[in-house]
Amino acid sequence: MSKLTVDIASIQLANPVLVSAGTFGYGDELAEVMDINQLGAIVTKTLTLKPRLGNPAPRIIPTTGGMMNSVGLQNMGIESFLQTHLPELRQKITIPLIVSIMGDSPEEFKSLAGMFNGLTGVSALELNLSCPNVKAGGSSFGVDPQLAGEVVQAVKEAVKLPVFAKLTPNVTDIGVIAKAVEAAGADAIVAVNTFNALSIDPETHHSRLGNWKGGLSGPAIKPLALYQVYHTVQAVKIPVIGMGGILTASDALEFILAGASAVSIGTGNFINPRTPLKVIKGINQYLEKHHLSDFQTLRGTFNPSLSG
Ligand SMILES: Cc1cc2nc3c(=O)[nH]c(=O)nc-3n(C[C@H](O)[C@H](O)[C@H](O)COP(=O)(O)O)c2cc1C
């Protein structure tokens, strides 16, 4: 039997395939169509202090090889989640649950994080430093190494749970941001969020989305995301969870060869909610085909000096 288990910041995962924030609801919405407990871990939709209605429609449009979204962080707010949803999730989920949070300031991130002290059923917090769709705050934390570090430090002071920093790819050098969040105490990095994108309808001269811009995801971004993940891995020692356009086991393996400790699937869940399960199966088949007993022997074995 091949081995798919992996530890990320002392959290034991049965396999290295997660589902990404904002693409899998609050964690259990898809429990009727698949066995969600076969996943490595689940990351919730990003939660904010107050409920948010999000951006005007249309919020999602197809693009060549992907999709653009401007959901604008619609969510039920942290209190509803903790009081009404988390108790139900605890009954249904046996795998690690990672809760994604976003605040308007380091202080707001800190108070959100403080609410998780003493709670059971949550394995880690993921800090959304990168959402490009929110008019106030939004990407500003993730494009500034000092601010990104301040947020991580504030959260680490407030909570004992492992803290994952999710980075935006919309920067000149992601390695600089990665180093800053590592120095501030992040236990892992999640890379990457969507790429800033624009789609204009020539008939109306307006954006095709309800918001003027959106975030591009899906297969179209895979080579771009892979480059950013490789660069992130080179910059830090903490584990990196890689994502961006993964639909198949072969896609996931590219991220592992680039050095990711685990991978995550976002847009793939909209195409087929069973995509992550197919990826897990495919990684197993690859390991068997190549007579490998542990997927971790593949991690970071990409050699940039050998090409073609
Ligand atoms: C509809 C949609 C909603 C998203 N919502 C969030 C979110 O709430 N928080 C977050 O950190 N990332 C969010 N993302 C970004 C994804 O988690 C992921 O980082 C990105 O889409 C790249 O991966 P993919 O190409 O596999 O989708 C969202 C993406 C999509 C497509």
Image (cartoon, grey):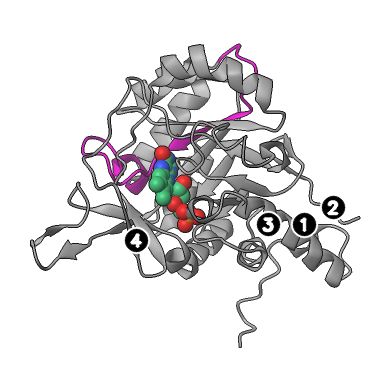
Q: Residue at x 27, y 34 (%)?
A: 54
Q: Residue 38: horizontal and vertical position, in percent? A: 72, 42
* Residue type highlighted by circle 3: Lys
Between residues 4 and 259, which one lies in front from this camera angle? 4
Cα–Cα span, label 4 and label 1: 35 Å
Between residues 238 and 57, which one lies in front from this camera angle? 57
* Residue type highlighted by circle 2: Lys
Cα–Cα span, label 4 and label 3: 23 Å
Comparing labels 3 and 2, the label whose residue is closer to the camera: 3
Name the residue carrying label 1. 296
Cα–Cα span, label 1 and label 3: 19 Å
Mark before the other along the chain sequence, 2 or 1: 2
The reply, left or right, for residue 304 in relation to residue 286 is: left
Quarter placement of the N terminus: bottom right
Q: Residue at x 84, y 52 (%)?
A: 3
Residue 236 part of the magenta-drawn span:
no
Comparing labels 4 and 1, the label whose residue is closer to the camera: 4
Name the residue carrying label 2. 3
Specify the segment rendered in magenta: 117-143
The reply, left or right, for residue 291 in relation to residue 244 is: right
Q: Residue 8: horizontal and vertical position, in percent? A: 68, 41
Cα–Cα span, label 3 and label 2: 16 Å
The reply, left or right, for residue 3 in relation to residue 15 is: right
Tell me whether circle 4 and circle 1 mark residues in contact (CB < 8 Å): no
Residue 133 part of the magenta-drawn span:
yes
Mark before the other along the chain sequence, 2 or 4: 2
